[in-house]
Image (spheres, rainbow, N blue to C red):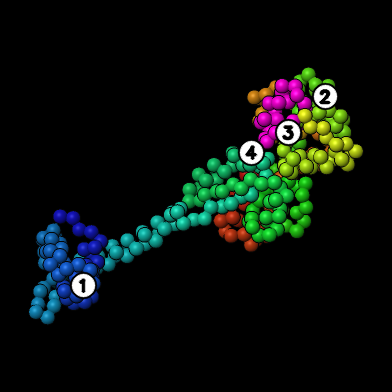
C-alpha cells in the first residue's frame, strides 16, 4: 500500500471537523472512499488511528503522532513548492537587448552563452537595429537597454563604455593601398568602394566623413553584411571600411589586406546605453553588470 499527501490532508480534515463524513466532504471525496483510505492507512501502520463513536471520531495515541508528522510533512511540501517556483521559466519575460550589427555579430556571441548558462531561468531577445534607431527607442522608452556607437548623440541618456570598436579599411593584397599599414580616409576616397546598404548607420557615418573632406564615395557594389563585402574585396573588385573586429574574424576566410584608419571618427566605441541605470529592473541591472564585467 502507498499513501500520499492527499491521505495526510484527509486525516487533518477529519481531525479539524471531528467527523469522518465532514472530513470526506472537505476533501471532495465520498464517505466510502474516505473510509477505505483510512482503513488502508491503519493496515499499513498496523494500528488504529481513530476511535469511532456515534458522535464522531477521536484520535488514538498513534493517531496523535500521525497528525503531528502529517502537519510537518505538509508544511515541508508547501515550502518545497514555493522554492521550486523560482526556477519556473515559462512566466519570466525575456531580457531585450537592442544592439547594432557590430555588437550583434562581433562582441555578443561569446558573452551571451556564458550569461545564459549562469542564469538558466533567463531568456534573451536580441533586437538588431541601427544605432540611430536604438537611441530613439531608448529616448522614447520603447527600449530599456542598448549597445550603440558613440557616433550618435547620447548626451540625454546614460552611457557606459562597453568596447572599443575601431574601423579599418580593407583592400585586395595587390591594391595600390596595400603598401600602407595606416592611412587617413582622404587617401582612399579616389578609389571605388564596396559598401553596406544605404540605410546602414555605419555607411552613413563614412559618407558624412567623406563629404566633410569634399568627396562623394563612389560605390561599385552595395551589400547587406560584412562577410559578403570581404568576399567581394578579396576578389579585387574594390575597397571597403568595416569594424576591425569583423575584419579579424573574416581574414581567415578571405585574402585581403587590412589598414588602420587614422582620426577620432574611425576610433569609435560601443556604449551600453539606457535612460537611467539605477532605475532599470533588477533583471536588467544584473545583465548590464554582467556585460560590463565581461567587456571585451
Q: Quadrant of the C terminus?
A: top right
The earlier-in-sequence mark between 2 and 1 is 1
Rounded to the nearest angstrom, the CA distance separating label 4 from label 2 is 27 Å
Where is mark 1, residue-wise? 25
Where is mark 3, residue-wise? 222
In the image, which is nearer the foreground, mark 3 or mark 1?
3
- All told, the count of numbered labels is 4
From the top left corner, tell me how far across and down residue 74 is, in percent. Answer: 29, 64
Residue at the spot 57% in from the left edge and 43% down from the top edge: 112
Q: Is residue 171 magenta?
A: no
For the residue pair 50 and 135, the one nearer the viewer reads as 135
The earlier-in-sequence mark between 4 and 3 is 4
Where is mark 2, residue-wise? 177
User: Which residue lies most toward the top here?
Assistant: 174
The earlier-in-sequence mark between 3 and 1 is 1
The earlier-in-sequence mark between 3 and 2 is 2
For the residue pair 143 and 85, the one nearer the viewer reads as 143
Residue at the spot 23% in from the left edge and 59% down from the top edge: 4
**Which element type, helix, strand or loop, lies under badge 1?**
helix
Residue 143, located in which quarter of the rendered image?
bottom right
Disc 4 + disc 3, Cβ < 8 Å: no
Range of magenta residues: 221-240
From the top left corner, tell me how far across and down residue 117 is, in percent. Answer: 50, 44
Q: Is residue 224 magenta?
A: yes
From the top left corner, tell me how far across and down residue 71 is, in percent. Answer: 27, 67
Where is mark 4, residue-wise? 105
The numbered disc on residue 125 is none
Amino acid at each position: 500500500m502507498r499513501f500520499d499527501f492527499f491521505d495526510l490532508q484527509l486525516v487533518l480534515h477529519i481531525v479539524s471537523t471531528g467527523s469522518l463524513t465532514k472530513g470526506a466532504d472537505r476533501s471532495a471525496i465520498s464517505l466510502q472512499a474516505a473510509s477505505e483510505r483510512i482503513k488502508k492507512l491503519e493496515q499499513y501502520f498496523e494500528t488504529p488511528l481513530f476511535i469511532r463513536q456515534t458522535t464522531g471520531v477521536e484520535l488514538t495515541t498513534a493517531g496523535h503522532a500521525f497528525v503531528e508528522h502529517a502537519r510537518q510533512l505538509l508544511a515541508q511540501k508547501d515550502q518545497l513548492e514555493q522554492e521550486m517556483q523560482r526556477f519556473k521559466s515559462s512566466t519570466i519575460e525575456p531580457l531585450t537587448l537592442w544592439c547594432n550589427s557590430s555588437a550583434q555579430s562581433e562582441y555578443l556571441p561569446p558573452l551571451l552563452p556564458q550569461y545564459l548558462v549562469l542564469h538558466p531561468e533567463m531568456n534573451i531577445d536580441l533586437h538588431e537595429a541601427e544605432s540611430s534607431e536604438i537611441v530613439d527607442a531608448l529616448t522614447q522608452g520603447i527600449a530599456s537597454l542598448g549597445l550603440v556607437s558613440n557616433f550618435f548623440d547620447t548626451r540625454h541618456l546614460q552611457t557606459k563604455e562597453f568596447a572599443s570598436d575601431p574601423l579599418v579599411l580593407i583592400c585586395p593584397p595587390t591594391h595600390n593601398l596595400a603598401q600602407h599599414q595606416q592611412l587617413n580616409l582622404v587617401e582612399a576616397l579616389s578609389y571605388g568602394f564596396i559598401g553596406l546598404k544605404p540605410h546602414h548607420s555605419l555607411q552613413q557615418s563614412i559618407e558624412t566623413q567623406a563629404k566633410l573632406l569634399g568627396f562623394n564615395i563612389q560605390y561599385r557594389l552595395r551589400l547587406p553584411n560584412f562577410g559578403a563585402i570581404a568576399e567581394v574585396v578579396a576578389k579585387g573588385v574594390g575597397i571597403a571600411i568595416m569594424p576591425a573586429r569583423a575584419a579579424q574574424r573574416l581574414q581567415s576566410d578571405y585574402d585581403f589586406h587590412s589598414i588602420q584608419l587614422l582620426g577620432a571618427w574611425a576610433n569609435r566605441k560601443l556604449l551600453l546605453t539606457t535612460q537611467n541605470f539605477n532605475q532599470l529592473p533588477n533583471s536588467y541591472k544584473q545583465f548590464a553588470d554582467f556585460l560590463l564585467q565581461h567587456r571585451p
